[in-house]
Amino acid sequence: MLGKLKIGEKGKIADLSKADRLVRRRLLDLGITEGTEVMIKGIMPFGGPFMLESYGQCVGIRRREALLIKVERI
């Protein structure tokens, strides 16, 4: 799960199907699809969002959504 990665770890998106439809659409609009490599740039405290980097851009995603996205560690 994306939400299980630590800061600095990389993963490849394996499954987006369980994420909310709007979150999937947003990620797809940014070019983040299944098979895309992402790196955790930061995790905000107190249950805040995860900051992902992919293709040189940073994206924030809610922790509960990150826990629904399957990734393969790289």
Image (cartoon, grey):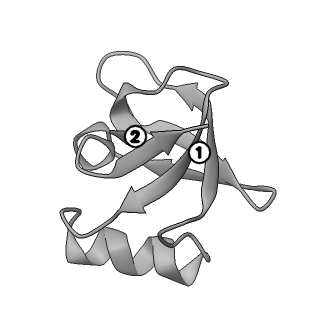
The answer to whether the residues at label 2 and label 1 have Cβ atoms under 8 Å apart is: yes
Amino acid bearing label 1: Leu
Q: Position of residue 52 (x, y in %)?
A: 59, 45
Give SS at disc 2.
helix
> Tag 1's secondary structure?
strand
Q: Residues within 10 Å of mark 1 (few under 14, many from 20)?
A: many
Compared across the picture, whether 32 is left or right of 21 comes to right
Count up the numbered dots. Answer: 2
Position of the C terminus by quadrant: top right
- Provide the residue designation for mark 1: 52
- Image coordinates of residue 37 in percent, x first then y, are 64, 54
Give the vertical position of 58 relative to 27 (above or below): above
Name the residue: 31% across, 52% down: 69
Q: CA distance from mark 2 to mark 1?
A: 10 Å
Q: Residues within 10 Å of mark 2 (few under 14, many from 20)?
A: many
- Which three-letter amino acid code belongs to the residue tagged 2? Leu
Q: What x and y, as percent, mark residue 42?
A: 59, 27
Between disc 2 and disc 1, whose residue precedes?
2
Disc 2 target residue: 2
What residue sits 51% from the left and 49% below the top? 60
Location of residue 7 in the rendering, given as x and y in whole percent from the top left corner:
59, 21
Vertical placement of 73 versus 16: above or below? above
State the image quarter where residue 36 is shown: bottom right
The answer to which quarter of the image holds residue 24 is: bottom left
Q: Residue furthest right?
A: 56
Determine the image quadrant of residue 62: top left
